[in-house]
Image (cartoon, rainbow, N blue to C red):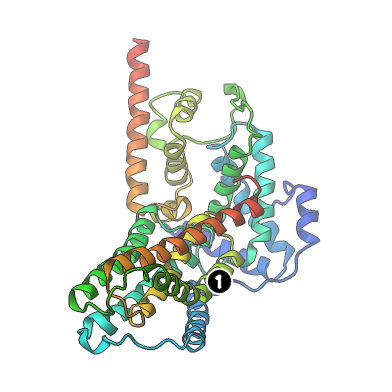
Amino acid sequence: MGVDRQAEERRLIEFMIGYQKGRMDDFEGLYAALRQPLLRYLWTFVRNATVAEDLLQETFLQIHRARQTYTPPRPVRPWVYAITRHVALMHLRSGRRRKEMLADDQLPEVPVPPEMEKLADRATLHRLLAELPRHAQEVLMLHHLLGMSFQEVGQILGIAPGTAKVRSHRALKALRERIAEREGGAE
Amino acid sequence: MNTDLLPESLRQAISDDLAPVKPLPPVWMRTLYAVAVAAVGLALVIVAFKLTLRPDMSELPMWLGWGCTVVQLVVGVVLIGMALREAVPGSGVPAGTVALAVGTGVLMQILVGIATWMNSPGMQWIEGKGLSIGLGCAAHDLALGFPALVATLWLVFRALPLRPSVSGLLGGTGAAVTADAINHIICPMSDLRHVLVWHTGVIFGLMLVGWVVGKLWERKRFGNS
């Protein structure tokens, strides 16, 4: 973990401690720091900006109800992302899910793995990413795009760090293969 | 700090209910709470049922008598600790570890039962009395495991288990293994028919209870499991 990541994690811990003490400013700080990455993570579950925003609000309500279950100074992000994941999975199971694919021009600002950027345009990469199984998308999102360690990814998904690493490797391989297939088909 | 994006409805919901909260104690401390309740419960059950050491205790080697009890107690406490860890978001126990821990608890009970039977025949099997003796032992096992199960599940559901059935399964197994650790040095029967049907049966029963309670809690808390 780099110095920036450590500083960011310390900031999140301070926000959580203040929030547990009942300070609204600290909740707002937590929201501001986590809103964008959580929306990106939610993109792996829903492809609709409105639904993602709704789920983000639901996530923060769940975080609020469960705020005493965070124990300082444990890392905040695995705790928050695990709750986010659960909210998203509950949404998918609830039957409220609709066809949520968006046209390319409606895609949210979600980055793609840096090593993939040169291989295809952004819209194509998004489409290929979306075709991967969800567990593969999740690992790519958490590790490659949101910069989490395999230890943190394992804590969020409830799997061993080694399993997270293997899933990440396989997901990248699958993505590369799809890009190669697409290029082969285009020739 | 840019808080413009915080929706007003969310801001209102949070600020309406922003009482200070006390963070959950760490897992080891919550495990100690559960173990303390379980220990008191075990002591009360032993006194209430007037349970005593098995008559052939002196014939069992130390490692098989007290030794296996201590090891089973440790495994039971570890399982309870895992249940409490699983109950906190972002601390999920990997599926392989859950299977290994639960399997170890069950397998250990079976192996201890077989080893005991090989070392000492214990009380003789009485034809026609198997059911009544078995029911008596199952009642003891359930009573011994009940305080640990209740304490563990109470602590589990005070947190936010995102896979409550997994937490319940671990807690149920932990309580069952803890109870069997004590009953191993109490039950006079070594006959494998008795041990594998009634004692192993109670372990599976408490595992099932923990899992089902977890499922029910999930339905109540999250509505659509």
The residue depicted at 33 percent of the width and 37 percent of the height is A170
Q: Nearer the viewer, residue B212 or A6?
A: B212
* Residue A77 seen in this snapshot: no
Q: Quadrant of the N terminus of chain B?
A: bottom right
Residue A133 image position (x, y, % from top left):
44, 33
Q: Position of residue A26 (x, y in %)?
A: 68, 63
Residue A95: tell me if it is visible: yes
Instruction: Identify whether A127 is placed above or below B156.
Output: above
Mark 1, residue position = B150
Total marks placed: 1
Q: Nearer the viewer, residue B152 or A105?
A: B152
For residue A54, what is the image quadrant?
Answer: top right
Q: Secondary structure at mark 1?
A: helix
Q: Nearer the viewer, residue A140 or B108?
A: B108
Q: Residue at x 32, y 44 (%)?
A: A166
Q: Nearer the viewer, residue B17 or B146?
A: B146
Disc 1 residue type (three-letter): Val
